[in-house]
Image (tube, grey):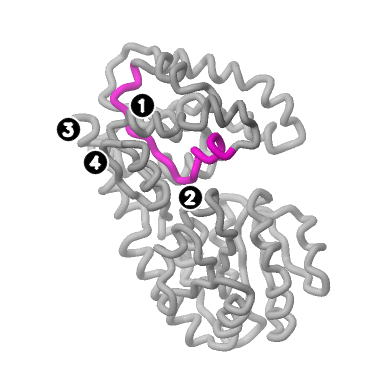
Amino acid sequence: MLLFSRYSRRGPSTRLRSLQYLPLLRDRGIDVEVHALFPDAYLEKLYGDRPASARRIAWQYYARRIRQTLRRDTHDLAWVEGELFPYLPHWLESLLARSARPYVVDYDDALFHKYDMSSSPLVRRVLGRKIDQVMRGSACVIAGNHYLAARAAQAGATRIEVIPTVVDEHRYTVVNHVDEGRPVIGWVGSPATEEYLLDNRDVLEQVCAKHNARLLLVGPRTEVAGQFGSLVPEVVAWSEDSEADMIARMDIGIMPLRDGPWERGKCGYKIIQYMACGLPVVASTVGANVDIVRHGENGFLATGTDAWRHDLEQLILSRRLRTRMGLAGRARVENEYNVTVQASRLANVLHSAGGH
């Protein structure tokens, strides 16, 4: 099988949706040859101080992918992350990728909205239905949540399987919630998602001040700390090696979101990470959050400032509640939201799509 990913290991979607499965798929008789469109060096330039340089060299990676898709060696199936050639029209992509069929295509965000909701009229006109066409031509659409699956059904995909984005639960240590010390409200994200955190800064400031709680932020820009007024959060850089340890320092995990089309396509991975560490969660009532969080059992689904304040205060004030909800979340990860369980499902999809 050929895997056409967008990035190498530094790309979160690639790492979680495909690369972490490869050893388990091999055990199930599936050998995967990985072809990343953009290497890690490209991401370092793009997200560092040389984005223009990264964009100038992007076409050399497109040329390499063209050569890869035109190979005539035998493979049973192509596994495509989103699309083969970002920002190329479907007719050209399909022409270049004739040897990459049959194929399955995988989505863990609303990639189609980058095109059909673009601010550019030209992009909307030329590419607005591209992802629908990619979905329709696939042997199977693997969707990370039901919003993405619904789009695939609307596009006319012949087969759709919902496989959530999950964790290797063995990487996460269950925390021991104690009464001593100040409770820690934690958030994991990136500069691209810190706006959702800042939407809730007033309630976080109020709750932390009232109950002497702390705020730990993993992954935003360091400047975010200065936007919380009297509350001084601890801001830590994200890394794959340290993220599980950082989450284990928390007592409550939060995932605020806005209720928009792009956000409905998110797969709630951070919630699953919190639950893997035995944390209760408070999350916005948006998209996959509703499927993952069982309100009152492993956390709370909050809509509006009053609900966020009430739910956070309940968890801050009760160690017993934090422990009970955290263990319920961990049990759900062990039973459903982990790589071993989902690897069996993924292997079945790939075997059948490849004709086995």
Q: Amino acid at mark 1?
A: Leu
In this rendering, the label closer to the viewer, 4 or 3:
3
Q: Position of residue 108 (x, y in %)?
A: 45, 45
Q: Secondary structure at mark 3?
A: loop
Which residue is at 73% across, 66% downward? 234
Q: Is residue 206 left or right of residue 310?
A: right
| Cα separation between marks 4 and 1 | 16 Å
Mark 3 / mark 1, whichever is N-terminal: 1
Q: Earlier in the sequence, mark 2 or mark 3?
A: 2
Question: In 3D space, how far apart are the residues under numbered discs 2 and 1 (Cα atoms)?
Answer: 26 Å
Q: Quadrant of residue 230?
A: bottom right
Q: Nearer the viewer, mark 2 or mark 3?
A: 2
- What amino acid is found at the position of numbered circle 3 in the picture? His
In the structure shown, which secondary structural element does the residue marked by tag 1 occupy? Answer: strand
Cα–Cα span, label 2 and label 3: 31 Å
Asked whether, in this view, residue 205 is left or right of residue 102, the answer is: right
* Callout 2 amino acid: Gly
> Residue tagged by mark 3?
356
- The residue to which callout 1 is attached is 2
Q: Where residue 227 appears, x then y in whole percent?
A: 80, 63
Write down the region rendered in magenta. Answer: 99-117
Q: Give the secondary structure at mark 2.
A: loop
User: Separation of disc 3 and disc 1 at Cα?
Assistant: 16 Å
Given residues 69 and 197, the one toward you in this image is: 197
Q: Which mark is residue 28?
A: 4
Residue at disc 4, secondary structure: loop
User: What residue lies at 51% left-to-right and 16% top-to-bottom?
Assistant: 64
Look at 40% across and 63% down and name the residue there: 291
Q: Foreground: 127 or 68?
A: 127
Residue 109 in magenta?
yes
